[in-house]
Image (tube, rainbow, N blue to C red):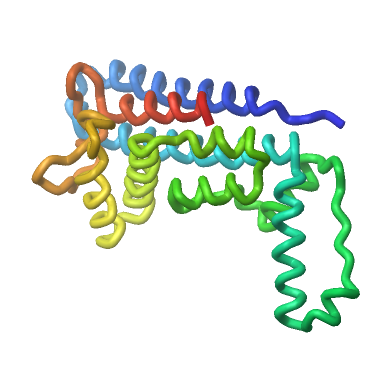
Amino acid sequence: MRKVDPADVRQDFETNARDITEFFDRTCQALSGTPMKESDISRLATTSFLALFVTFERFLSDLFLAYLNRDCSVYQAHLVSRLNDSIESKFGPGVSSLVSLRTKAHVSVDELEDIVDPDGWNLTFQTVDSLKAAAGNWLPPAFANRVKSINAGEGRLIDTARVVRNFIAHQSAGSKQRMNDALSTVEVGGHNRHLGRGQREVHGVGSYLKASHAGQRRIHRYGSGLLIISAHV
């Protein structure tokens, strides 16, 4: 049975992320000298960031499937335990003792998608903590430890990028507040330099993302940070 290579998943993300940021750069250059340059670049930064983080979320989903495709034993044991607990809680130990659940030594990618993601929406994780918890429950230690190697600064980068994405997508007062809360702490511990918002709240996310500090736009700082993470998870 052909196995999905996690290295290929990482390479696909790197290629797609660089395509997005290079498109951003080319378009910025093409806008030079145009009357609406700054507002257009703000809008471009917003849409490019949205594409970048959606690509990262897809990468995490594909990576988990690749890991499970390599070794699904921990996930199956976790699933069997949950099913047995559910049967016993609903029907009692007598019924539970009559039920036998069958597992498979080799599970194809198509089967995994139906099992792990039956609705076909990709695997999503609301926080880095939930991502690590899923890794611990589903993956063998060699793979789980890679996901758990995301350090505190990297975790804040991912979680901050997610709430920025959510504000771009929803434009609600609540999503804006969560974004600004995250931007006030993203640099804690000396990590993620120049991504914090300072004392003022961010109202124009495009202006925030296109802003350049120490010679690098923030959208590129997010991109390079996500690429570093993708290389070791």
Q: Which residue is drawn at the image coordinates 78% and 43% (left, top)?
A: 110
In screen coordinates, is 104 left or right of 110? Answer: right
Residue visible at 31% across and 33% down in the picture: 45
For image coordinates 45% across by 25% down, the residue present is 227
Residue 63 pos. (x, y %): 61, 36
Which residue is farthest left?
Answer: 199
**Residue in front for this viewpoint, 121 or 151:** 151
Q: Residue at x 34, y 19 (%)?
A: 25
Residue 23, position as x, y percentages in the image: 41, 22
Does residue 182 appear left or right of residue 198 in this picture? right
Q: Is residue 158 above or below residue 213?
A: below
Using residue 169 as the reference point, say whether residue 145 is left or right of it: right
Residue 137 image offset from top left, x and y in percent: 62, 51
> Residue 88 versus residue 3: which sits nearer the camera?
88
Q: Quadrant of residue 28?
A: top left
| Image location (x, y in percent) of residue 53 | 43, 38
Q: Is residue 55 visible?
A: yes
Question: Looking at the rendering, in which quadrant would you find the N terminus?
Answer: top right
